[in-house]
């Protein structure tokens, strides 16, 4: 079958070196951002002609050196940073308690499989060999769970810190030109993207090597224990996504309904009491939550691929380089994304507003094209020409070029999903313009058009996912699906940079408004934000598409691990699981949307109270009580995130213990099939409503001007649509992809326990 060209020592060196390069690159980007000072003395204009400094773009503001503006920006940034830090610390206290409790549960459940025996046991897939005891799997799974959880929390927190560090700097750079502001926002996003991708890779690599010291040749046990890493990452992502999503949307809905609709004041007006909470929410929901979410996807895809490979020829023959193929793909991804980032920040110069969105989209195209070549290099150097892959009880012979196609099809399916998402959510295209046009006749027709758009937007992404599944499974069974998911996530650093850029630009616009900067500055930050809004929708599309593939790969690993030969939907045990699993995303969405609604209700009442009782607030002579609104969002999100989280975490345990692995396999399949559809339609509906509102507000075309201006009846109808869409696109939709992944990885981790002790009800009856 041949051997890989890259020796084991080469793989041992390449992976950590690429991870360190990613971390160093992120620190360099952070240093460049930090050169923009938040002190009045350093705000003098520069003569540098690059990156948007051209004479025709500078249009220096009167008072560019005015100390008050810079000081005001710094004050607002500190308020946003303190609010975000305070919320995350409060959230992490609750999440920390859960983390410890769940870690104990993992140890008890997995340790009890063999009665906490310390004796070696026959291997699951090769009874002639002895493997490490179940107690070892319990201990190491618990450790890897905690490692994944801590890495996920740190990733989200670091992302939030850099975003709150960069928002005011982006605002100040917008005075010099849109190009300079773009570079600060994008570099800040890149800090988060590369830190997260590199940290996730490095921690997983170190964990594998440390576990290997104990497990030795027992790779089956080693990589089974590593699955806890994915579970830890995703469980933290769930609470980050749900908690952050409830926080940001409670503030956003409250600010919009009272400020824009009732009081007819601009978005981010400093008179609005909910404005600081709204800007804090962008960071804790869209930055920290998204970071944890995509880290969870990456960790789970890697774990699923490693588990399946450990019982194939890589694991049997102890081919370490081939075994680490998933990590080598991610290593190449960091290098490719590094080169791609330079296209946006150094190789080309943004000179006009219309160049912003193409620059961001080019990041996706360039990274995908270069990564295709990168995958080919990794495949031909790190895999033997032919090998076997475990395929439900049999070994399937696979060629290395077939595995290359599996990864490539996942990579390109991600790009297709991204661009379809853009078509349905960008106001440059007819679907969103039709939604905006429907606002002529009021909010009801806007809602109808938006829902129809969301349902229709599911079609092409589902076909793309279906083709990716068919191709990758045909070539390399479940391993093919796992590496296809990794292919989709291989450009995660670029994807996250683009995604984080959006909330940073949004905050920059809010700070410009609150600091009383001129209308021209606000137009520039709005242009940055409009492009970021579309790319954020693309990021959500990537996250959902990768979640579908990751979940299916984990499902395959679970079925193999639980020794299920076939999943027959005609048996009652499986069918009841299927129908209940398909219902779970609806139950989960209902809980998260109601949570946003109840939190927003409290926010609306508080904002109305302040406008009615604080003399001079509307006139701008009195300051609102921002802190109370921040506290309402914090308290509501912490309280409301627990029930949806409990639903997701407890379902696999309850079904596995009482109904057994066959019913649980039905639940996982049902949740996957229905969850993906709802997630895509919810995210795209919300994104379309948001951009329809922005289309009317911007008034960039003759058609848009006939619907405006701000405050007109069509604009108010668009604001109502946007308000309904907020919890769909930023809370329920993005959280659903964590639901389908998390239930699958949790089932995989607990599979030995369910296979041994599960199905209590069926055993009784």
Image (cartoon, rainbow, N blue to C red):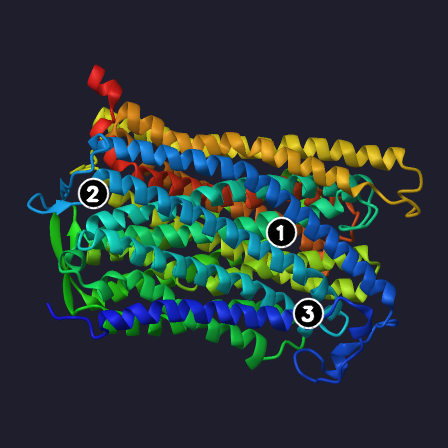
Which is nearer the N-term, disc 2 or disc 1? 1
Q: Nearer the viewer, residue 139 or 67?
A: 139
Q: Residues within 10 Å of mark 1 (few under 14, many from 20)?
A: many
**Of the residues tagged 1 and 3, which is closer to the observer?**
1
Residue drawn at the location 25% of the way across and 45% of the way down: 557
Residue 204 visible: yes
Residue drawn at the location 18% of the way across and 37% of the way down: 564
Q: Is residue 407 above or below residue 286?
A: below
**In x, y percent, where is residue 504?**
64, 59
**In x, y percent, where is residue 308?**
23, 51
Q: Quadrant of the N terminus?
A: bottom left
Q: Is residue 713 above or below residue 69?
A: above
Q: Nearer the viewer, residue 433 or 618?
A: 618
**In x, y percent, where is residue 198?**
44, 63
Give how far apart the Cα atoms at labels 2 and 3 are: 51 Å
Q: Residues within 10 Å of mark 3 (few under 14, many from 20)?
A: many
Identify the element where label 2 is drawn: helix
Residue at numbered disc 3:
181
Residue at numbered disc 2:
560
Residue 463 visible: no
Identify the element where label 1 is drawn: helix
Q: Quadrant of the C terminus?
A: top left
Residue drawn at the location 20% of the way across and 55% of the way down: 216
Q: Is residue 406 above or below residue 175?
A: above
Q: Nearer the viewer, residue 185 or 103?
A: 103
Which is nearer the N-term, disc 1 or disc 3? 3
Which is nearer the N-term, disc 2 or disc 3? 3
Residue at numbered disc 1:
283
Residue drawn at the location 75% of the way across and 66% of the way down: 38
Give how far apart the Cα atoms at labels 1 and 3 are: 18 Å
């Amino acid at each position: 079958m041949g051997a890989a060209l890259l020796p084991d020592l080469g793989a041992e060196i390449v992976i950590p070196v690429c991870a360190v390069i990613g971390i160093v690159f992120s620190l360099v980007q952070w240093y460049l951002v930090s050169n923009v000072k938040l002190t009045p003395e350093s705000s003098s204009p520069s003569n540098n002609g690059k990156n948007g400094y051209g004479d025709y773009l500078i249009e220096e503001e009167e008072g560019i050196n005015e100390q008050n503006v810079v000081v005001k920006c710094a004050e607002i940034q500190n308020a946003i940073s303190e609010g975000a830090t305070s919320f995350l610390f409060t959230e992490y206290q609750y999440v920390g308690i859960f983390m410890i409790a769940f870690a104990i549960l993992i140890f008890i459940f997995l340790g009890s499989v063999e009665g906490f025996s310390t004796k070696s046991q026959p291997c699951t897939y090769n009874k002639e060999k002895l493997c490490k005891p179940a107690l070892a799997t319990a201990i190491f799974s618990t450790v890897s769970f905690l490692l994944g959880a801590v890495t996920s929390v740190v990733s989200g927190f670091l992302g939030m810190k850099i975003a709150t560090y960069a928002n005011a700097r982006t605002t100040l750079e917008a005075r010099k030109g849109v190009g300079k502001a773009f570079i600060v926002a994008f570099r800040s996003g890149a800090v988060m993207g590369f830190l997260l991708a590199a940290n996730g890779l490095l921690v997983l690599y170190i964990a594998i090597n440390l576990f290997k010291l104990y497990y030795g040749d027992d790779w089956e046990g080693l990589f089974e224990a590593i699955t806890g890493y994915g579970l830890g990452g995703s469980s933290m992502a769930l609470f980050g996504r749900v908690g952050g999503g409830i926080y940001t949307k409670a503030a956003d809905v409250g600010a919009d309904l009272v400020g824009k609709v009732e009081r007819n004041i601009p978005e981010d007006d400093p008179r609005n009491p909910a404005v600081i909470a709204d800007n804090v929410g962008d960071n804790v929901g869209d930055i920290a939550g998204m970071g944890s979410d995509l880290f969870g996807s990456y960790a789970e895809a890697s774990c699923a691929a490693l588990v399946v490979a450990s019982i194939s020829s890589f694991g049997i023959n102890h081919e370490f380089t081939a075994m680490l193929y998933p990590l080598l793909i991610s290593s190449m991804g960091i290098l490719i994304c590094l080169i791609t980032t330079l296209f946006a920040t150094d190789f080309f110069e943004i000179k006009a507003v219309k160049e912003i969105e193409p620059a961001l989209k080019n990041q996706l195209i360039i990274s995908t094209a270069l990564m295709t070549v990168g995958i080919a290099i990794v495949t031909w150097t790190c895999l033997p020409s032919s090998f076997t892959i475990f395929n439900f009880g049999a070994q399937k012979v696979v060629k290395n070029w077939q595995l290359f196609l599996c990864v490539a099809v996942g990579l390109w399916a991600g790009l297709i999903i991204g661009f379809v998402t853009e078509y349905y959510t960008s106001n440059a295209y007819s679907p969103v313009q039709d939604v905006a046009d429907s606002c002529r006749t009021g909010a009801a027709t806007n809602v109808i058009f938006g829902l129809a758009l969301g349902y229709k937007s599911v079609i092409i992404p589902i076909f793309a996912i279906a083709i990716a599944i068919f191709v990758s499974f045909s070539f390399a069974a479940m391993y093919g699906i796992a590496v296809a998911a990794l292919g989709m996530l291989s450009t995660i650093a670029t994807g996250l940079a683009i995604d984080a850029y959006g909330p940073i630009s949004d905050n920059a616009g809010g700070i410009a408004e609150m600091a009383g900067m001129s209308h021209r500055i606000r137009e520039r930050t709005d242009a940055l934000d409009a492009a970021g809004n579309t790319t954020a929708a693309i990021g959500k599309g990537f996250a959902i598409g990768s979640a579908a593939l990751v979940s299916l790969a984990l499902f395959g690993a679970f079925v193999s691990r639980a020794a299920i030969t076939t999943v027959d939907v005609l048996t009652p045990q499986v069918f009841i699981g299927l129908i209940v699993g398909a219902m779970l995303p609806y139950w989960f969405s209902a809980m998260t949307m109601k949570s946003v609604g109840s939190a927003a209700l409290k926010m609306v009442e508080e904002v109305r109270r302040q406008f009615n009782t604080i003399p001079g607030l509307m006139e701008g002579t009195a300051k609102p009580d921002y802190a109370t609104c921040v506290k309402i969002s914090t308290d509501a999100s912490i309280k409301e995130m627990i029930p949806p989280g409990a639903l997701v975490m407890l379902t696999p345990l309850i079904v596995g213990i009482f109904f057994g692995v066959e019913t649980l396999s039905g639940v996982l399949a049902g949740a996957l099939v229905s969850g993906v559809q709802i997630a895509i339609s919810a995210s795209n509906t919300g994104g379309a409503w948001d951009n329809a509102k922005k289309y009317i507000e911007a008034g960039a075309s003759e058609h848009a001007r006939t619907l405006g201006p701000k405050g007109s009846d069509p604009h108010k109808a668009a604001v109502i649509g946007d308000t309904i869409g907020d919890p769909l696109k930023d809370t329920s939709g993005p959280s659903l992809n964590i639901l389908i992944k998390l239930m699958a990885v949790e089932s995989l981790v607990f599979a030995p326990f369910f296979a041994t002790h599960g199905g209590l009800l069926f055993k009784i009856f």
